[in-house]
Amino acid sequence: MRFETRAIHDGQEPDPLTGAVTVPVYQTSTFRQDGIGRPRGYEYSRTDNPTRRALETALASLEGGSHGLAFASGVAATSAVLSLLRPGDRVLAGDDLYGGTYRLFERHFRPWGLRIDYAPAEDSEAFLSALTDDTRLVWLETPTNPLLRLADIAAVSEAAHRCGARVAVDNTFASPWLQRPLELGADLVVHSSTKYLGGHSDLIGGAVVVTDPELHRKLKWHQNAVGAVPGPWDCWLALRGLKTLALRMEAHCRNAQRVADFLAAHPAVERVHYPGLPDHPQHALAGRQMRGFGGMVSAELAGGFPAVERFVGALRLFFLAESLGGVESLVCHPARMTHAAIPPSERRRRGIGEGLVRLSVGIEHADDLIADLDQALAAAGGGPTTGRSAKGDAT
Ligand SMILES: *Cc1c(COP(=O)(O)O)cnc(C)c1O
């Protein structure tokens, strides 16, 4: 069956008791057993819950894996994958990562004993030369956050496997509708289902999908032992979101392309980062590896931070907020919001400047989004004295 059909049916048989066509929210902590040692398939909801199992089955199907695991958040999912390693193990990660992932790596797992190195994953040659025989795990995000660079999943996976390393791909920005890392050779797919999978900015969740049953067994053990599981209601919301993933992603991609084209032609914008633009350094790779170019667009405003402040203050439809992947459009300033945990010198080295804004382009009408950006850019370019100087004087 095709993706759209599986999104609605896999793991989601009508309820055997009542015929309900949506999976019920099994809001229960425990399950009555028929006798000692005779449960009916569920014992305790940290270990397993029918609503969660439905979500995990659907996620595995959409990512083309055999096993899915749902977590309480994307960082809990990331943490579960890193916990497969032992102190002393080496991790090689791309150097343009979600800020919370970087924080988890540097402030939790490095003190815990992992050796973690970073290399630019969009530069296959440099990245592969940083791959050593003692590397146990390669961590990729593609497209990356916030600069939307791409890593070649197939090439990295092949080289990593030769070194005996496993490859995990954070597929949050693409979603399985646009990109399926397991089919390209990766071993683990990680998600923040808070973003496109849920799709409506109404839940926090995470997921890991794998093919290897042994990996699944270890992760399942960890999920139960550490206990960062989502509640049934959040699982139900994520399942509901999944059903329209294909439709939403098509709309996100269409709108983002229009927004990127508009920004690229605007004089107040210095540079636009979007894989769908022909001048994007991995435009060709995006065409091979992804079904579409995604809903995220980053742009550097010519006027630096003062222009950014005026721009976000003037936007009406794009809400200033962290997060992404919901139906509504959002704008954020990575340097001071999502990536504030990264030291300033490191941020600058990575190209996350003070003039950079990141847009999560929603599924409103593209004409309205472009009109909003147009008026906000006009306000941003409105000279150094508009509004801003009064605020500056006060501080
Ligand atoms: C948001 C995000 C995460 C973390 O997920 P949470 O659900 O916020 O814990 C990880 N990776 C990427 C790419 C993200 O955007």
Image (cartoon, rainbow, N blue to C red):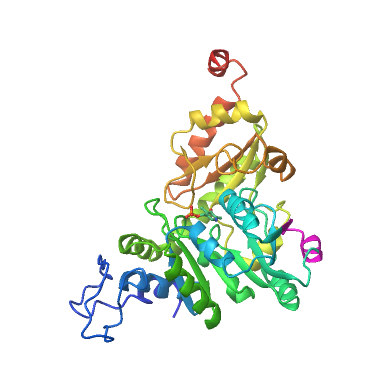
Residue 126 is one of the magenta-drawn residues? yes
* Residue ranking furthest to the left: 18
In this rendered view, identify the residue nearer to me: 349 or 377.
349
Measured as percent of width and height from the top left, residue 97 is found at: 63, 53
- In this rendering, the answer to whether 12 lies above or below 371 is below
Quadrant position of the N terminus in the picture: bottom left
236 left or right of 349 in image:
left
Residue depicted at 57% across the width and 51% down the height:
257
Measured as percent of width and height from the top left, residue 117 is found at: 73, 58
Res. 108 image quadrant: bottom right
212 left or right of 160 in image:
left
Residue 180 is one of the magenta-drawn residues? no
368 left or right of 159 in image:
left
In this rendered view, identify the residue nearer to me: 269 or 65.
65
Measured as percent of width and height from the top left, residue 294 is found at: 56, 56
Residue depicted at 72% across the width and 72% down the height:
160
Q: Is residue 47 visible?
A: yes
- In this rendering, the answer to whether 376 lies above or below 233 is above
Q: Is residue 180 visible?
A: no
In this rendered view, identify the residue nearer to me: 169 or 372.
169
Residue depicted at 53% across the width and 59% down the height:
172
Residue depicted at 77% across the width and 67% down the height:
131
Q: How many marks?
A: 0
- Magenta range is 117-129
Measured as percent of width and height from the top left, residue 317 is found at: 44, 38
Quadrant position of the C terminus in the picture: top right
